[in-house]
Amino acid sequence: MKQFVDLQGDYETFVFIADLHALNSIQDKKVMQDLTKELILDYLGIGLDPKHCVIYKQSAIPAHASLTWVFDTLITVPFMMRAHAYKDAVAKNIEPSMGLFNYPVLMAADILLYDTDVVPVGKDQKQHIEYARDIALKFNNTYKELFKLPSGMILEEVETVPGTDGQKMSKSYGNTIPLFGTDKEIEKAVMSIVTDSQGKDEEKNPEELVLYQIHRLFNDSKKLKDQYSKGLGYGEAKKMLVKDIIDFITPMRERRKKYEDDPKLVEEILLHGAIKANELSMQKLQAVYEAVGLTQ
């Protein structure tokens, strides 16, 4: 999410709430509405500026689903069976829904509708950029060259963020540190971060420590790295991390509260974002329809 904020001044930036994708895991109306509201506030709270960034709900843009169907008619089932999420589900004996099976195609539509140049993602999303490029090439070669080939932007320092248990940080693993949690919730999560058995005074390679890998996201100073290298005690390090996280997010909390207290302003931001996104996406969809013969 930090990448979105950092890049919004350098690119024409589009950021959306992926509520159509969310239907794959959420079949509860109130939960969907609540999580959508919370994520919008999170985006605004971290510093996304509607003056420099187009913010909208995916479901407010009909072209996403329409383009997905056009792409569906071009690609094959074996091509989709290579997707990591599908293979992971099968490996875990989970019967995948069509939404899960097909969501890389919807993601390709999300990207390609806007002539996207770069997509800031984590390492685990690299395959989806490759899918978008492959689908764009298939369309361009079959009909007409309409789509740019996007590139993924993966920052090395955040390509994979470890969770409190050392696995990839993910809500599904229950190993996250809540960005907008209370001080106590943040402290509880930080204190649960796994540590090794080295003593306080033993020299360590900070890069191998889950605690440091998380800590450097909030404080990447050489001083901190040296402290870890020289055997900074884990209890002391966790207290320092709690403070660094709270210092980091306090301005975000204040900004988020401002938007939370002004729901009409949030509605206006989403409306203006949807108008802009619809204008651009419908232009692209119309060109696609003309290329495939759906217009007279």
Image (tube, rainbow, N blue to C red):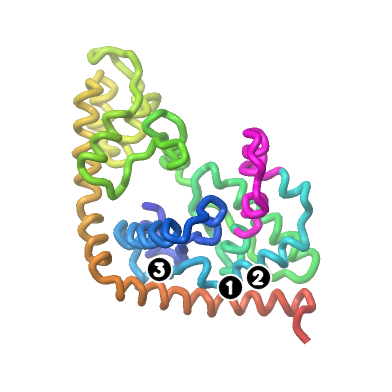
What is the C-alpha distance between the residues marked 3 and 2? 24 Å
Seen from the viewer's position, the closer of residues 222 and 240 is 240
Residue 233 vertical placement versus 293 (above, below): above
Identify the amino acid type marked 1.
Pro
Position in image of residue 90 (x %, y %) = 67, 37
Seen from the viewer's position, the closer of residues 234 and 98 is 98
> Which residue lies under the disc numbered 3?
53
Callout 1: SS:
loop
Position in image of residue 76 (x %, y %) = 78, 53
Specify which label sits upstream in the sequence, 3 or 2. 3
For the record, the magenta segment spans 82-106
Residue 190 vertical placement versus 39 (above, below): above
At a point 20% along the width and 42% down the height, the residue shown is 183
Callout 2: SS:
helix
Q: Is residue 33 left or right of residue 118?
A: left
What is the C-alpha distance between the residues marked 1 and 3? 20 Å
Task: Please identify the quarter of the rendering in which residue 216 is found.
Answer: top left
> Which residue lies under the disc numbered 1?
62
> Which residue lies under the disc numbered 2?
66
Task: Please identify the quarter of the rendering in which residue 228 is found.
Answer: top left
Whether pointer 2 and pointer 1 mark residues with C-beta atoms closer than 8 Å, the reply is: yes
